[in-house]
Image: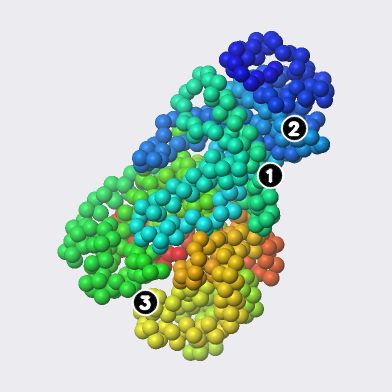
Amino acid sequence: MQLSNGWTELIEDAKRQAAHAAIIAAPKQPVSSLAADHFQSKVTFINSREHAETMLQLVRQRAISHVGIRFSYFYSRPGVPINEHDIAYDPRSIRPTLLALTFVEHSGNTGTYRFVVDVRNPEVLPALKELLKEPIRFVGHEMKSDLFCLWKLRLGDVDMLWDARVAEGIQDLGRLHPRYARDKTDNGQAAQECEYEERFRLSLRGTCQHHGIRYMREQASLERQPVEHSAADIDGVVEDATAIASLYFAQVIDATIKGSLHHLETIAMDWTRTVARAEWRGVKPAVLLCERVREACEARLRELESQLIVFGIENFRSHDCLMEFFAKHGLLELFINDGEYGFDRKQLGLYIDRHEAMPLLYAARHIADIQRTGILNAQLIGGDGRLHALMELLGTESLRLTTKWPNILGISRIMRPLIIPETGYGIIEIDLSQIEVCIAAVVYWDIKLIHLCNSGDVYNGMAKLHYNDIPEADRHLSDKKFKKKHGPKRDCMKILTLGIIYGLTAFGISNLLNISKHEAQTLLEKFMAMFPSLRQRRDDVAAHAALRGYACTVSGIRRHRAAMGPLSDWELNWMRNHPIQGSAADPFKVACNRLDRLLRRFHAGLIVLFHDAVVIEAPLSHLQAVADLASQELCRAVQEMFPVLRPRVDVNIRRPESWNKDGDPNSVTDWLADPVKSALKKFEKMEE
């Protein structure tokens, strides 16, 4: 059956299985080359088992290179308005209606076969399920929604996928950072325009435009519950699939030129599926506890605001108000970073003892942060009783994952017990210990630092090297006992380590350690002398990056500079930092991609993905086995990529009845009793 014009009449013909039957071969008969010719340059509508099986046979008999895929769908549940531009939808309520497939053949003459499948008819699904098992590259754009549709239809996974949006974002990493626009014009509007430009650049229209591929369709809006599709709907989804199929070769060539093809094929595309499944699974909130916290936030915030007014802080959310307050008390310089003043909770926590208003200000900001995450918004709970945070793969230039609606990754350690497992399940958290320091040791090839990383707690080892007044007996203590006895010395080494890796100056160190700038400079010089290779090579890497215009990870991911002239301090820092953060992310993603598959046999799954830690929900009967498997995979992935390292993991499995930090499931109830005291616990104050 051929379709190009007159969709309504032809769809009716398909339903009656009447005209053009000769063109589509019988299901169990081989498709001849002549029949294959009839499918080229046309669109074939599929809405029966026979037609779906014929499409499958055609694909199996042709030398298909790849296939463009695009679903048309709607959501059965109303979305939750977030702002004037954004609406949060429950992915579990997705309802696929049409599936457009554009198969591209490369054997002699290039051929293209275009199909539209009515997936509302369950008869077509078995053949589609078999089609997905074919060793073909399935190419989508923002493919997470396509995966949701496949899972909703219970069609399983695709082994080889390519997300054109992810590929495009990785190629242009850093070019549209809002900092460049802000530096040029010094106004907030420029940053908004930059964000809009990036959104367009990564859209299907923008990506096609960049690669010179014709694409005329306007962005389609979601329909509530379409009964029948118009000709425009069908033409639109076909055009999407065809444009997406055309993008594949252009992006592969671009990635080959820019050195990122290996990363895209072996890490990034599987990571797309891993993240999509974590979003699809979601997390379960403790609804009643969330309600108590929501009410407490509102009441406690009113109290704190009235107390802060006494110190002259009329609006703790106001940047100008805080600028005035800290300037008045001679504390403003504590909060400068890369030439800008910032008063986030982490910065406030570092200097909590500098003024009596600081604990109140910190606690107020902590409450505001809790509210801002959206974890307390009951409207965001899906029909399955779980929260499905939107996970953005391109949220940062370091390619670290970001989340919103709610911001699961932004939940403070105190509030983590708001997330609980399903009945009969438990929650495990496993993180790679001090991984970025270890990766820095390898990337900058400092043998002494590599040895410390492989010998145990790296900060303990540094303290033993740095301080001469540590008794000899104490140098042989276990990591846990040494940390307890010489905690301040270890914390000092941690600050200095992060300083040398991420470009912290003597001025910043003096503020963090509450010592003079001269003392900080002396301390920093002594520390740097311990690791001369690290110091020299990080400067060399930044110098080379400045000359070529980008910094690069070990897997070839480039973060580009979008300015000319001398490097700013901010650019110098990220050029030193990108090879570390980006390279540390690679083995973590590889391990998560493996776990995404391996955990299914335990009926377990990843629910939260940090840059160096995973949170897993698993049946209580398999809790230890899952923890052991995840630990092994995380360490194995690091060792495969960096054989010289002996990575370690920290496993939190003691209290699986909730997500928690260090096995403390009572942190939320402690906070409810006294928000100020609870928020100022040391582990929260020093939170990374």
Q: In which quarter of the view is residue 557 placed? A: bottom right
Q: Tell me the kind of residue under disc 2.
A: Gly
At mark 1, the secondary structure is helix
Of labels 3 and 1, earlier in sequence is: 1
Residue at point 40%, 75% (across, down): 508
Q: Residues within 10 Å of mark 2 (few under 14, many from 20)?
A: some
At mark 3, the secondary structure is helix
Judged left or right of residue 190, residue 599 is right
Determine which residue is flagged by label 1.
249
Of labels 2 and 3, earlier in sequence is: 2
Q: Tell me the kind of residue under disc 3.
A: Asn
Res 134 label: none
Q: Tell me the kind of residue under disc 1.
A: Phe
Of labels 1 and 2, earlier in sequence is: 2
Q: Position of residue 492 (x, y in %)?
A: 45, 78
Determine which residue is flagged by label 3.
511
470 shown above or below 663: below
User: Quadrant location of the C terminus?
Assistant: bottom left
Q: Residues within 10 Å of mark 3 (few under 14, many from 20)?
A: some
Q: Residues within 10 Å of mark 1 (few under 14, many from 20)?
A: few
Q: CA distance from mark 1 to mark 2?
A: 15 Å
Judged left or right of residue 467, residue 22 is right
625 shown above or below 384: below
Regarding residue 200, the answer to whether it shows in the image is yes
Question: Which of the pair 210/144 is nearer the observer?
Answer: 210
